Image (cartoon, grey):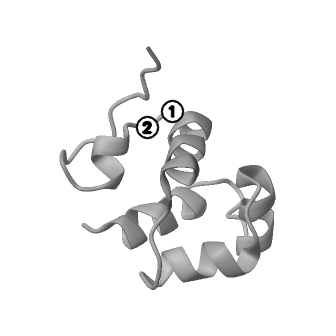
Amino acid sequence: MDFALKFQNLRDEFEPPMNQTEFGKILHMSQRKISSMERGETEPNLQDLFVICKRFNISADYLIGLIDEPLPFKRK
């Protein structure tokens, strides 16, 4: 599974599911940026990746495809 699909799945897992605008507010990103990342047109920069991992407590290794399970985010 690639980043775009994993990123979209994060949004879809909310109950009730969020739209891209609501999701963007949580991550301090525009709806346009969320949409672009979900379509695989762009990928997050390092700061965005850090925010996503911290907010959802998942490992960057999972999001970028190095591991298959979403391990907890660990800050050193």
Do labels 2 and 1 touch, CB within 8 Å? yes
- Name the residue that disc number 1 marks: 57
Say which residue appears at 51% left-offset and 74% top-offset: 37
- Give the CA separation, mark 2 to mark 1: 4 Å
Q: Residues within 10 Å of mark 1 (few under 14, many from 20)?
A: some
Relative side of 21 to 17, left or right? right
Decide: is 20 above or below 6: below
Choose between 70 and 32: the one closer to the eye.
32
* Type of the residue with mark 1: Asn
Decide: is 27 above or below 2: above
Say which residue appears at 73% left-offset and 72% top-offset: 19
Say which residue appears at 47% left-offset and 20% top-offset: 75
Relative side of 61 to 54, left or right? left
In the image, residue 6 lies at what x, y percent?
A: 39, 62
Number of numbered markers = 2
Choose between 13 and 35: the one closer to the eye.
35
Relative side of 1 to 11, left or right? left
In the image, residue 22 lies at what x, y percent?
A: 80, 64
Q: Residue furthest front?
A: 46
Image quarter hosting the N terminus: bottom left
In the image, residue 58 lies at what x, y percent?
A: 43, 37
> What is the quadrant of residue 11 in the picture?
bottom right
- Name the residue that disc number 2 marks: 58
